[in-house]
Amino acid sequence: MATDTDVLVLGGGSTGCGIARDLAMRGLEVTLVERGNLTDGTTGRMHGLLHSGGRYAVSDRASATECIEENEILREIAGHCVEMTGGLFVQRPEDSDEYFREKLEGCRACDIPARVLSGREAREREPYLASDIERAISVPDGAVDPFRLCVANAIDAENHGARIETHAEVIDLLREGEDVYGVRVRHDSGPGKRVHQSPGSTEAITAEYVVNATGAWAGQIGAMADLDVAVRPSKGVMTIMNVRQVDTVINRCRPKGDADIIVPHETTAILGTTDEEVTDPDDYPEAEWEVDMMIDTLSDLVPILEDARTIRSFWGVRPLYEPPETGTRDPTDITRDFFLIDHEDRDGVTGVSSIVGGKFTTYRAMAEEISDHVCEKLGVTAHCSTADRPLPGSENIAALEEGMDRFGLRSPVARRSTKRLGSRSREVLETDDPNPVICACEGVTRAEVRDAVSQSGSDLNAVRIRTRASMGNCQGGFCCVGMANELHPDHDEATARAALDELFQERWKGQRHALWGEQLSQAMLNYALHATTMNRDYDPARSEADRDVRPGAIGSGSTAADLEYDAFDQGDR
């Protein structure tokens, strides 16, 4: 039977995009489908830590070794996505000396560069550390932009011939007898680059081989073909502060627990996290007390967090997995290793495998392993080269250092733009047109926004993950309208309005748990700008018919009027 593609990859997170890139570089025809934007699942909901492996040096040395190996590879192939901040495991008076020693020995056993600092030396490096921090272990942790890295993998896959199809939800696995031969997807707004309000359609895509790389959703996908993939999703909350209170990743040097890490990320710091098993990766409680606990606990390490401004919180779901016979009760004890499930070996069903578990830092190694597996199945002898070939934007890291004045942009805009774009800076920023800053918080210019629109169509959330526009202190209050304006003239007014509503809704939902103090004032200002001044809560330009035909724009059947402004009444911090 003729097939549409050699390999069909399900899932547009880091692992799925890494697999698509790996296989496309080996010469296979690849199609990737993702139900939302790239990074819509776990990848887009992590704290941005590039693991040194130190975090696992006591409990899971195999994972620790794998992390430091991939850490070094990602620094080489994805320099424009990585900031090497370094990391500190800090010890408070009540923390165990024995555990501190075990952590240090574990790092050294796993070839993780580790050095002990006194409390004074640690505070010289990070002045806002608590005065009672006794000592610390320095390790090569870093910060990584998961959006930029994932998109770079997808772009490189496309450059090697892959088809990347976002907003294409898998609604059925195609199985005949004991063979899986493809999927049926529902296009949210038509195939290709997303255009709002395009008619939806379904499509059957057949393939020689199907890879289930949907993370926490792998069980749901497997069930479509009567395959049992026993993923154990575990939720974790992360809270974003308005500035970088620290420039180094700060870890609490104690056995794993809640609220023990602070990751400096771009212009912010991200506090994390919790670990609680849930049954449905799409539906779980998000409680305000989790945010309060995060801030209160981590203020023991960095006291100024107590009075700092919180701009938003978000929850992610880990795709934890362990062999069914293991039966671990505490999700924090489940290994962070990854597993390749060959459904032919395990279930007698050909044409499909699942890859589950793992961590963002090791996505490339996961992709390499399952790509080797797929090539063996298909009789392909090409080898993996993803560890040696830079991702788009990282081909010439020295270009990052030359961008300060080249494009007529003042620092820090030029520095941040060239950091985001890497070796693509000249291609994007050299323009004869005016290039004002659209997002003042993140220093994103019109040229970057237009470049992202050219990649992603009218989906402003896809523009957001490519540029960081609307992700700063105002959370889109001032720049959302400017971003929507850049959709003209390629997209009509109705499309721009719908895209604006969707982006603003996405920004709003993360602020609901941070409505106290200055962030409440910022949210009220955004409300005044968008709901009152610009009528975004009841836009007279939108007809009643428009209100009924936008499923998927900001939630099924919802409109901008559905913003939960009653949350303004709940902040009492």
Image (spheres, rainbow, N blue to C red):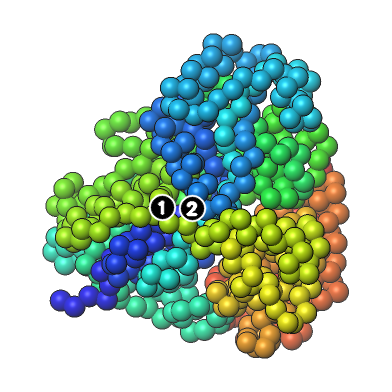
Residue at coordinates 63% horizontally, 83% vertically from top-left? 495
Mark 1 / mark 2, whichever is N-terminal: 2
Residue type (three-letter) at the residue carrying disc 2: Ile
Residue at coordinates 72% horizontally, 19% vertically from top-left? 119
Percent from the top left, x then y, of residue 341? 26, 47
Disc sitting over residue 388 in the figure: 1
> Left or right of 324: which side holds 500?
right
Percent from the top left, x then y, of residue 362? 43, 44
- Name the quarter where the N terminus is drawn: bottom left
Within 10 Å of disc 2 (Cα), the crowding (few <14, some 14-19, many 20+) is many
> Left or right of 344: which side holds 190?
right
> Left or right of 1: which side holds 160?
right
Do the residues bearing badges 1 and 2 touch, measured as CB atoms within 8 Å?
A: yes
Tell me if residue 129 comes above or below residue 269 in the rendering: above
Disc sitting over residue 77 in the figure: 2
Residue type (three-letter) at the residue carrying disc 1: Asp
Within 10 Å of disc 1 (Cα), the crowding (few <14, some 14-19, many 20+) is few
Q: Is residue 168 visible?
A: no
Residue at coordinates 77% horizontally, 64% vertically from top-left? 405
